[in-house]
Amino acid sequence: MASPQSVASYFAYSVRWDTSLTLSAFTILYYDYAMTFLSEVEYYWIPATPSLSFFLFVVNRYIGVLGPIPVFFEYFSELSERRYVSIRTDRYQ
């Protein structure tokens, strides 16, 4: 049986790896968006012809950009347990 200290150490190590991999995925995602933004403006925003393909492109592109924001806050914000419990209980009263 493993000691509690070694289990805690392994858990901390795993959390660090998970956080690092998540941060690298966010970095790649937003770097890709930054690199292709000028092409997006040139091909989709300057002609500005509303069509089904334009609408689908915008929805697909910006849900992909805005969707990971809650995940980012989940991984990298410091929300204390007391504050979290007060938020949860205030919502249902």
Image (spheres, grey):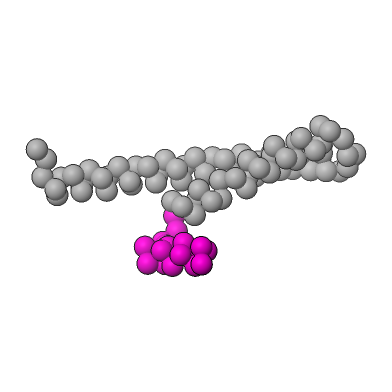
Question: What residue appears at the point 26 percent right and 45 percent down from the top-left corner?
Answer: 11
Residue 80 visible? The answer is no
Residue 67 visible? The answer is yes
Foreground pick, 1 / 41: 1
Image spot of residue 49 (x, y percent): 90, 39
On screen, residue 39 versus residue 21, left or right, reads right
Q: Which range of residues does the magenta coloring cover?
A: 76-93
Q: Magenta span has 58?
A: no
Image spot of residue 87 (x, y percent): 47, 65
Q: How many marks?
A: 0
92 relative to 51, above or below = below
Q: Quadrant of residue 63?
A: top right
Q: Quadrant of residue 42?
A: top right
Question: What residue appears at the point 14 percent right and 48 percent down from the top-left corner?
Answer: 4
Question: What residue appears at the point 44 percent right and 67 percent down from the top-left corner?
Answer: 86
On screen, residue 60 versus residue 92, left or right, reads right
Quick one: which residue is furthest to the top in this view?
A: 53
Foreground pick, 29 / 77: 77
Q: Quadrant of residue 31?
A: top right
Question: What residue appears at the point 75 percent right and 40 percent down from the top-left corner?
Answer: 58
Q: Quadrant of the N terminus?
A: top left
Image spot of residue 48 (x, y percent): 88, 42
Quick one: which residue is furthest to the front in this view?
A: 93
53 relative to 5, above or below = above
SS majority, magenta: helix
